[in-house]
Amino acid sequence: MLLAVGSAKGAPGATTTARVLAAVWPQDVVLVDADPAGGDLALLARRPDDGALDPDRGLLSLAADARRGLGERPLEDHLQQVEGGLEVICGVSTPDQMAGIGPVLPQVAGAFARWPGRDVLVDVGRVSPTSPTLPLVQAADVLVLVARPRIESFAHVRERVRWLAQLRETNLRTPEVAVVLVADSRDRTSAGDLARLLAHDGLPGTVLGQLADDTRAADVLGGRVERPVARSLLVRSARQLVDPLRALSQSGRGVRTTA
Ligand SMILES: Nc1ncnc2c1ncn2[C@@H]1O[C@H](COP(=O)(O)OP(=O)(O)OP(=O)(O)O)[C@@H](O)[C@H]1O
Ligand SMILES: [Mg+2]
């Protein structure tokens, strides 16, 4: 299963959401840093022996293999392990590098979607019609769009869902869209408000649920603070999203004719 995690606009917490989902994912999982603006993983994460990650091993090395037609080397060669045991594919350092690997991203995306025995979670950064990571979004089973409970965030999500629905009408492969709201756990109304907004326009996105707005745990996931987070609201709320996400990925709604 390939899951893309991104945002419509702003910095609502897509990277944090991808990380926490990978941390609680119940099956073998790979976290891919594909933010076109330049990834953070290679800068922030540490290996289990506390060494730094190799920024050239990851998307860049995988793209180099893809130019030769993937298959010579196993995908596992591009993985690195980070403290805690999670396996990751490091991202690019600059937007230019992402533009450079653009032509082979469809092959890379296909390899992620078919990775034997693994689910793959990709942080695709901001999602728009001009986003260089569109091949990854299009190959995904589900696109998780992260939003905040604010009018402008809702409006941007609605426009992104509308655009994806239009793509689908042109027979292009599109993922199921799952909106995740980063919101206070006492907020019982925003998710319903957004669902009604999408339904009012006849748009196909599912408001999957809420991820706790939990600054302390988000700081830990961002590598800024060290503290146990297993029992945090953020981690607990992420666990609640796993089964609905897997169910949505298997629901196979929509047109999936062209790769
Ligand atoms: N669930 C959360 N609770 C509280 N704060 C959060 C949460 N998720 C993210 N944040 C905070 O919001 C800020 C942006 O988070 P993050 O980098 O994950 O967002 P992003 O959408 O990936 O941004 P960008 O578009 O810059 O890549 C960070 O300070 C992060 O700690
Ligand atoms: Mg990010």
Image: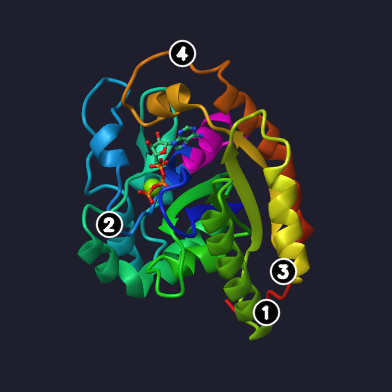
Q: CA distance from mark 2 to mark 1?
A: 29 Å
Q: Nearer the viewer, residue 204 or 30?
A: 204
User: Does residue 258 lie above or below 154 as drawn?
Assistant: below
Mark 3, other Cα within 10 Å: few <14 / some 14–19 / many ≥20: some
Q: Residue at x 51, y 47 (%)?
A: 121
Does the magenta segment cover residue 19? yes
Residue 213, quarter of picture: top right
Q: Say what secondary structure mark 4 lies in.
A: loop
Mark carried by residue 257: 1
Q: Amino acid at mark 1?
A: Thr
Q: Residue at x 57, y 26 (%)?
A: 235
Instruction: Say whether residue 209 is left or right of residue 100.
Output: right
Q: Nearer the viewer, mark 3 or mark 2?
A: 3
Q: Amino acid at mark 3?
A: Leu
Q: Position of residue 72 (x, y in %)?
A: 37, 60
Residue 232, quarter of picture: top right
State which tag comes first along the sequence, 3 or 2.
2
Instruction: Say whether residue 216 is left or right of residue 256.
Output: left
Q: CA distance from mark 3 to mark 1?
A: 20 Å
User: Does residue 130 lie above or below 141 as drawn?
Assistant: below
State which tag comes first along the sequence, 2 or 1.
2
State which tag comes first along the sequence, 3 or 4.
3
Quadrant of image for the C terminus: bottom right
Mark carried by residue 60: 2
- Residue wearing tag 3: 203
Q: Nearer the viewer, mark 3 or mark 1?
A: 3
Q: CA distance from mark 3 to mark 4?
A: 39 Å
